[in-house]
Structures are given as structure tokens and as C-alpha cells.
Amino acid sequence: MATVKVKIISSIAGDNYSYAPGDIIDLDEAIAQAWQEAGLSTPAPDGEVAAAQIETLTAQLADATGARDGLAKAKSDLEGQLANAKAEKAGAIADKVLTKKAADDAQAALSAAQKAASDAAVKTATDLAAVSKERDDFKTQADELGKQLADALAQIETLKAAATPAATTTTAAPAAAQQ
């Protein structure tokens, strides 16, 4: 079915439409004929059809311009968010690099401390072994000196014992001579 443009003369409304006087609309030819016969519409003059089309197109252009402006603002907002995200990413990467360096430095310090502790443990064990040997040597020397001292004391006692009877005899002989 073909459609025609009509100009509404009287207000009319239905379940899915509502038109006011002066509206230019498209209708099926049969419905347009019935509405014209009922006095609800007239054929739309070409100038008014063009004006209505201009008005419709102007409204569509305004909607499209508004949508374009909204999209431009959304684009600008997204670009700002992207710049912020890039800056955050760069900061996170820099933090990661610093954290990695700190972890590497800490690992190097730990390794150095472990080596120093190991070296100290080896030196301590070596020193302890040397001190233990020196202690054992001193003990051996002390035991040896103790034996020498005991032998010297025994010799002194032997010499004292040997000298005491002679002294008693020497002391007794002058006494006997005096009598």
C-alpha cells in the first residue's frame, strides 16, 4: 500500500498514536481518504510537507549533534582515564623496579651475612680446635711438671733422710767428746 502525507486538522488519538492540529504525518491512502472525508485531515501542501521535513530533519540534526557532543565528551573523559591509567601503570612499574632492586639488595646482603656467619663459624671452630689443643698441651705440660715436682720432692725427702742421720752423728760425736 502506498502512503500519503496529510495535515491534521482536528486532534485525534488512538491506542498507539496522538496527533494535534497542524501535524504532518504519513498515512495509508485508504485511511487518509477516510480521515479527509471525516474532516480530520487534509492533503498536506508541498510547502508544509517540506517545512515539516525540514523541522524533522532539524530535530534529528539537533539530536545527532547532541549525541556527537556527548560522544566527544565521553571520548575526552576516556582519554583522561587512559592517561591516568598510563600514569598509574608507569608508577606501578617504577615501584616494581624499586621493589625488585630492594629485594635483590636484601638478597645480596643476606648472602653476604650468611657468608660472614659461615666464615665466622669456620674461624671459631678453627680457633676452638687450636685452643683445645693448647689446653691439652698445657695439661700435658702440667702433668709432666707435676711428675717432675713429685720426683724433686721425693729426692729432697731422700736427701733430707740421708742428711739427718749424718747430722745426728756429727752432733752426737762432739757431745761424747765433752764427757
Image (cartoon, helix red, strand yellow):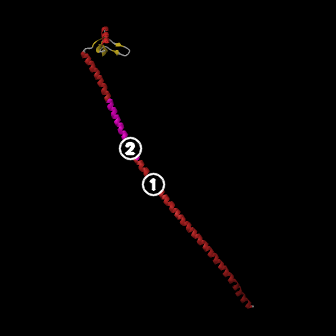
Q: Quadrant of residue 176?
A: bottom right
Q: Foreground residue, 33 or 36?
A: 33
Circle on res. 91: 2
Image spot of residue 80 (x, y percent):
35, 37
For the C terminus, the image quarter is bottom right
Task: Tell me the magenta residue range.
Answer: 69-96
Horizontally, residue 151 falls left or right of residue 55, namely right
Q: Residue at x 56, y 66 (%)?
A: 132
Does label 2 or label 1 sit earlier along the sequence?
A: 2
Q: Name the residue nearer the viewer: 177 or 42.
A: 42
Label number found at residue 109: 1
Disc 2 residue crowd, few under 14, some 14–19, many 20+, Cα 10 Å: few
Question: Against 141, is 12 above or below?
Answer: above
Please identify the residue farthest to the top as the structure is shown: 37
Q: Amino acid at mark 2?
A: Gly
**Looking at the image, which residue is at 41% across and 46% down?**
96
Q: Residue furthest left?
A: 47
Q: CA distance from mark 2 to mark 1?
A: 26 Å
- The quadrant in which the N terminus is found is top left
Query: What residue is drawn where x is 36% and y is 41%?
Result: 87
Residues 74 and 27: in front is: 27
Report whether 142 appears left or right of 106: right
Q: Amino acid at mark 1?
A: Ala
Q: Is residue 131 above or below residue 156?
A: above
Principal secondary structure, stretch drawn in magenta: helix
Q: Please, what secondary structure does the residue beneath circle 2 have?
A: helix
Q: Percent x, y for residue 101?
A: 41, 50
72 lies above or below 137: above
Question: Which residue is pictured at 28% across the width and 20% down the height?
Answer: 55
Q: Secondary structure at mark 1?
A: helix
**Residue 152 image point, x, y percent:** 63, 78
Please state the horizontal and vertical placement of residue 97, each as a whole percent of the image.
40, 47
